[in-house]
C-alpha cells in the first residue's frame, strides 16, 4: 500500500511517501522537507501568524499534489505542537482544507508520542524495555519509554524555535530536563527530529544530506559538545555556510544542540543512536493498518 504523510511542525513541513507491506515493512519512496516556520511567534503570542499559516498551507498543498502524482492512494495530514497550542488553530485548519480538500488531524501529545515510538521501531531493532526515544522538535521535546509494558510519555516545552525566540539559557533546559532524565537514566537513547539529524549531518560533514548515513549513526556527547563550542563562535552568516547545516536552520541550531546536550548530560548517556524513522513512519503504518498497539499508556 502506498501512503503519503504530511506533517506541519513548528519549524518544518515534512513529507513522506512510503510503500507499506502487509507485515509492516516500510519502504521509503521519497521524503522532503520545507522550512515554513509555522510556529513563528507562537510561544510569545499564542497565535499562528497569518503569513506563517499561508506559506505552510501552500507547502502542504504542494506536497499533497505531488503525492497524488506519485500514486499515493492514501494521503494523511497531521499537525503537532504549534497547531496544537495555537489559539487560532481552526483558521489554519480551514486554510489547509480549502487548499487540499482534506481534514488535517491535530495530534495530541499522547498520540504524537505513540506514533513517534512506533515509527522508530520500524527502522531500528531494539528492546523497548531498555530504551528511551527522544524527539527534539521546534516547539517541544518528546521523551517516550516503556515501563512495565506500558508507554510513558513526557512532552516538554523545549524546542529549538521556542528557546531561540524566548532567548532562554541553558538553565531553562536543565530545569525542564532534570526530573525526567532521572527516570530514563541507564536506558539506551534513540534520537529523532530535525535538530538531531542536522547535528549528525554536521558531525559527518555531509555536503548533501544522506539519510542512509544519518540513520543508525551513534552521535556521541563529545561530538555534541564540540559542535556547541563551534557554533557559539560563529555569526549567523557563518553558520549558514557550515557544511551539513541547512541555512534555514542556522538561527535555531545552537538552542537545539543545548537541548540534546542537556539530555545526554542529565541521563549520563555517552551518546544516542539517530533514527531517520520517526512520527511520519508511525502514522504511515497506522494508515496501512499494520501498527500493532502492543503498548498502552501509563
Image (cartoon, grey):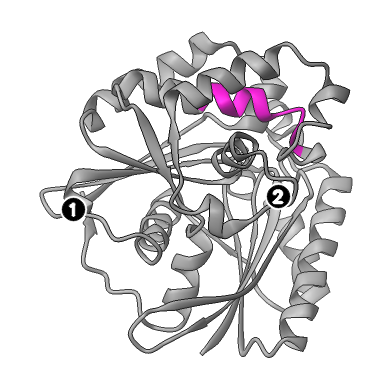
Q: Position of residue 268 (x, y in %)?
A: 29, 21
| SS category of the residue bearing label 2 | strand
Asked if the magenta segment contains residue 252, the reply would be yes
Residue annotated with mark 2: 12
Q: Residues within 10 Å of mark 2 (few under 14, many from 20)?
A: many
- In-front residue for pair 77/63: 63
| SS category of the residue bearing label 1 | strand
Range drawn in magenta: 249-259
Q: Give the answer, above or below, for where 211 lies relative to 230.
A: below
Q: Position of residue 157 (x, y in %)?
A: 51, 30
Q: What secondary structure prevails in the magenta region?
A: helix
Q: Is residue 100 left or right of residue 149?
A: right
> Residue at horizontal 76%, vertical 56%?
91
Viewer-nearest of labels 2 and 1? 2
Q: Residues within 10 Å of mark 1 (few under 14, many from 20)?
A: some
Q: Give the answer, above or below, for where 103 lies relative to 12.
A: below
Q: Is residue 198 left or right of residue 121?
A: right
Residue furthest to the left in view is 148
- In-front residue for pair 280/49: 280
- State how far apart marks 2 and 1 are (Cα): 30 Å
> Residue at horizontal 27%, vertical 45%?
145
Q: Give the answer, above or below, for where 248 lies relative to 121.
A: above
Residue annotated with mark 1: 150
Q: Is residue 220 left or right of residue 159?
A: left
Asked if the magenta segment contains residue 126, the reply would be no
> Residue at horizontal 79%, vertical 49%?
36
For the image, the number of numbered tags is: 2
For residue 273, which quarter of the picture?
top left
For residue 258, which quarter of the picture?
top right
Amino acid at each position: 500500500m502506498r501512503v503519503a504523510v504530511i506533517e506541519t511542525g513548528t519549524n518544518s513541513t515534512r513529507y513522506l511517501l512510503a510503500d507499506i507491506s502487509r507485515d509492516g515493512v516500510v519502504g521509503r519512496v521519497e521524503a522532503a522537507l520545507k522550512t515554513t516556520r509555522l510556529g513563528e511567534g507562537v510561544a510569545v503570542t499564542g497565535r499562528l501568524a497569518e503569513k506563517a499559516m499561508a506559506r505552510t498551507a501552500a507547502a502542504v498543498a504542494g506536497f499533497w499534489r505531488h503525492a497524488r502524482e506519485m500514486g499515493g492512494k492514501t494521503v494523511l495530514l497531521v499537525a503537532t505542537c504549534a497547531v496544537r497550542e495555537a489559539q487560532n488553530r481552526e483558521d489554519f485548519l480551514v486554510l489547509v482544507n480549502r487548499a487540499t480538500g482534506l481534514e488535517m488531524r491535530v495530534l495530541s501529545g499522547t498520540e504524537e508520542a505513540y506514533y513517534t515510538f512506533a515509527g522508530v521501531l520500524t527502522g531500528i531493532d531494539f528492546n523497548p524495555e531498555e530504551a528511551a526515544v527522544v524527539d527534539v522538535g521546534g516547539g517541544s521535546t518528546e521523551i517516550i519509554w516503556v515501563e512495565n509494558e506500558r508507554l510513558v510519555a513526557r512532552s516538554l516545552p523545549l524546542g529549538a524555535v521556542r528557546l531561540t525566540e524566548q532567548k532562554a539559557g541553558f538553565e531553562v533546559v536543565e530545569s525542564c530536563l532534570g526530573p525526567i532524565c532521572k527516570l530514563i537514566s541507564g536506558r539506551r537513547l534513540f534520537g529523532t527530529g530535525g535538530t538531531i539529524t542536522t547535528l549528525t549531518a554536521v558531525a559527518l560533514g555531509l555536503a548533501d544530506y544522506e539519510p542512509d548515513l544519518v540513520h543508525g549513526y551513534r552521535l556521541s556527547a563529545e561530538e555534541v559538545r564540540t559542535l556547541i563550542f563551534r557554533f557559539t563562535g560563529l555569526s549567523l552568516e557563518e553558520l549558514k555556510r557550515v557544511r551539513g547545516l541547512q541555512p534555514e536552520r542556522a538561527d535555531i541550531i545552537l538552542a537545539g544542540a543545548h537541548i540534546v546536550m542537556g539530555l545526554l548530560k542529565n541521563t549520563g548517556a555517552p551518546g544516542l543512536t539517530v533514527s531517520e524513522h520517526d512520527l511520519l513512519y508511525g502514522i504511515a503504518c497506522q494508515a496501512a493498518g499494520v501498527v500493532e498497539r502492543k503498548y498502552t499508556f501509563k
